[in-house]
Image (spheres, rainbow, N blue to C red):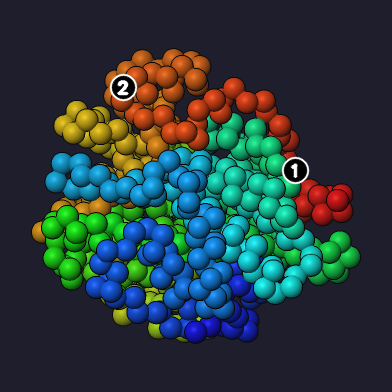
């Protein structure tokens, strides 16, 4: 198996190469030339790490089994606050899959705990002696998860760009107080899309001789990296097998998943799980008021020409969902020229349409729904009242999405992507509680209502701030070049 670019103009590569590159030279995203079959029947009793071993070996050709084993061990042994890694909770008649037990209390830890290991192994394997400079645009959670995952990894530097407005005080503190000599953090005057567009521009425009002269290559830790996508397949299998072992379903019966969606990485992993043979029923793509994807599933037109809205679920405030390109590629029967044409239209006109046959293929699995901030807050209050369970605002969008899509006979698993403690002001407001001014007092108020305080957030607001630069998106290139030249 090899990995191909969705735009078809770059040579096929093995997984270590794809992990180091992040994005393909033609601007496309890497995807296996053939989706590997991974029958869940063979994995009945497997725990998270055994599943990760099996799935990563299948999806990341070019790494040996021993290399993968070491990566999995380093990523997940004793780094999460539960040995289950991603526990599944029954809430009413449905389920919540808690993906936030990692070192920064958000789901991105699942993938960003192992990506640095996969990159380290790839550097060694390929005998690369250059430094790798990782550029990451973040809507909040990717930044801290990447900074934590890569902290002091030799040969790798990380530059994180986050939107100045629109992230929570705790998210900001998690990034701006990071230690690690190889880490740099900048606030951008603009929104997440401005930060992401800036990073893409640097990849496209960084002169090759500048990289050579300063001995580094660029890479990305964003969710387009195949080394981030593949580990996310693991918890779909894990949740499914837990439901089988609990007797809730028979092996082979479908399970629906409702996924709070931004860049479309999390939910795409669910689709890959389905293509690999996991009986995934519906994938409910839950968006907040930035409902580009909802409209796409309903109308076959992806149109980002609309106002960017700041919501209470900032990690989903996205108008260009990069990973959707992989779904489009698969739905267009791997016609890379047709993908190129659409990505060109997206760049020039901000929109593209898919033909009906492609859309039919997508709709056979995906349902798009959106929930407003108010609907999310109502869901937080209701689920707390009825079940004593506290959700964060992202999870709430997916919960509300499940309700709107309608539950069928299959059980539905709602993916929970952040601890409620990352967004205490919003959760307290939803519950009708008064909201203290001070972020630490908010956190204390929430934990006193029964939200377990993640180890990751203990004391974060008291740590000294190390990074305070605020820059314009058009200056990002200059900052990156400055850092590259300054070692
Ligand atoms: C990143 C993130 C999402 C969106 O996930 P995608 O893979 O980008 O769709 C949802 N919720 C939280 C809390 C996140 O950090």
Q: Residue at left 66%, top 46%?
A: 151
Q: Is residue 329 above or below residue 210?
A: below
Q: Is residue 84 left or right of residue 184?
A: left
Q: Is residue 449 left or right of residue 200?
A: left
The answer, for residue 123, to whether it is visible in the render is yes
Q: Position of residue 297 (x, y in %)?
A: 32, 63
**Res 453 → quadrant:** top left
Q: Which residue is mark 1?
A: 181
The answer, for residue 349, to whether it is visible in the render is no
Mark 1: secondary structure: loop
The foreground one among 63 and 262 is 63
Q: Which mark is residue 117?
A: none
Q: Position of residue 458 (x, y in %)?
A: 50, 28
Q: Position of residue 177 (x, y in %)?
A: 65, 33
Q: Position of residue 20 (x, y in %)?
A: 65, 67
Question: Mark 1 or 2, which is nearer the eye?
Answer: 1
The foreground one among 468 and 317 is 468
Q: Residue at left 56%, top 28%?
A: 460
Count residues near mark 2 (Cα–Cα under 10 Å), then give few for <14, some for 14-19, many for 20+: few
Q: Which residue is mark 2?
A: 449
């Amino acid at each position: 198996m090899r990995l191909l670019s969705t735009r078809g103009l770059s040579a096929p590569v093995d997984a270590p190469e794809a992990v180091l590159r992040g994005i393909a030279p033609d601007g496309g995203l890497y995807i296996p030339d053939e989706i590997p079959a991974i029958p869940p029947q063979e994995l009945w009793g497997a725990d998270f790490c055994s599943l990760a071993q099996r799935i990563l070996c299948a999806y990341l050709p070019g790494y040996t089994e021993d290399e993968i084993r070491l990566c999995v061990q380093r990523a997940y042994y004793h780094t999460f606050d539960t040995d289950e890694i991603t526990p599944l909770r029954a809430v009413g008649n449905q389920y919540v899959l808690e993906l936030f037990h990692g070192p920064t209390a958000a789901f991105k830890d699942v993938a960003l705990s192992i990506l640095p290991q996969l990159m380290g192994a790839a550097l060694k394997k390929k005998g690369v002696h250059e430094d790798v400079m990782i550029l990451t645009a973040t809507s909040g959670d990717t930044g801290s998860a990447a900074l934590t995952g890569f902290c002091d990894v030799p040969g790798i530097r990380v530059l994180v760009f986050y939107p100045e407005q629109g992230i929570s005080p705790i998210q900001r503190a998690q990034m701006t107080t990071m230690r690690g000599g190889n880490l740099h953090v900048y606030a951008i005057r603009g929104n997440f899309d401005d930060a992401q567009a800036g990073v893409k521009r640097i990849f496209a425009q960084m002169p090759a001789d500048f990289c050579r002269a300063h001995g580094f290559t660029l890479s990305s830790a964003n969710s387009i990296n195949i080394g981030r996508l593949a580990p996310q397949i693991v918890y779909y299998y894990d949740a499914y097998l837990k439901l089988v072992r609990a007797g809730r379903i028979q092996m082979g019966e479908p399970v629906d998943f409702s996924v709070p969606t931004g860049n479309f990485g999390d939910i795409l992993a669910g689709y890959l799980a389905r293509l690999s043979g996991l009986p995934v029923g519906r994938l409910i793509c839950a968006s907040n008021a930035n409902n580009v994807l909802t409209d796409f599933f309903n109308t076959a037109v992806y149109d980002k020409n609309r106002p960017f809205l700041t919501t209470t679920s900032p990690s989903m405030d996205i108008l260009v969902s990069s990973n959707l390109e992989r779904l489009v590629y698969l739905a267009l029967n791997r016609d890379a020229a047709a993908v190129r044409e659409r990505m060109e239209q997206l760049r020039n006109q901000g929109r593209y349409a898919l033909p009906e046959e492609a859309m039919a293929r997508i709709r056979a699995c995906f349902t798009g729904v959106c929930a407003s901030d108010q609907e999310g807050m109502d869901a937080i209050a209701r689920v707390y009242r009825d079940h004593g369970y506290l959700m964060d605002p992202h999870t709430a969008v997916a919960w509300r999405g499940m309700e709107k899509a309608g539950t069928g006979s299959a059980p539905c698993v709602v993916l929970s992507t952040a601890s409620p403690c990352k967004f205490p002001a919003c959760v307290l407001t939803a519950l009708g509680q008064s909201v203290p001014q001070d972020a630490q007092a908010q956190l204390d108020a929430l934990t006193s209502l029964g939200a377990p305080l993640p180890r990751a957030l203990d004391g974060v607001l008291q740590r000294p701030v190390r990074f305070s630069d605020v820059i314009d998106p058009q200056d990002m290139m200059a900052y990156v070049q400055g850092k590259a030249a300054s070692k």
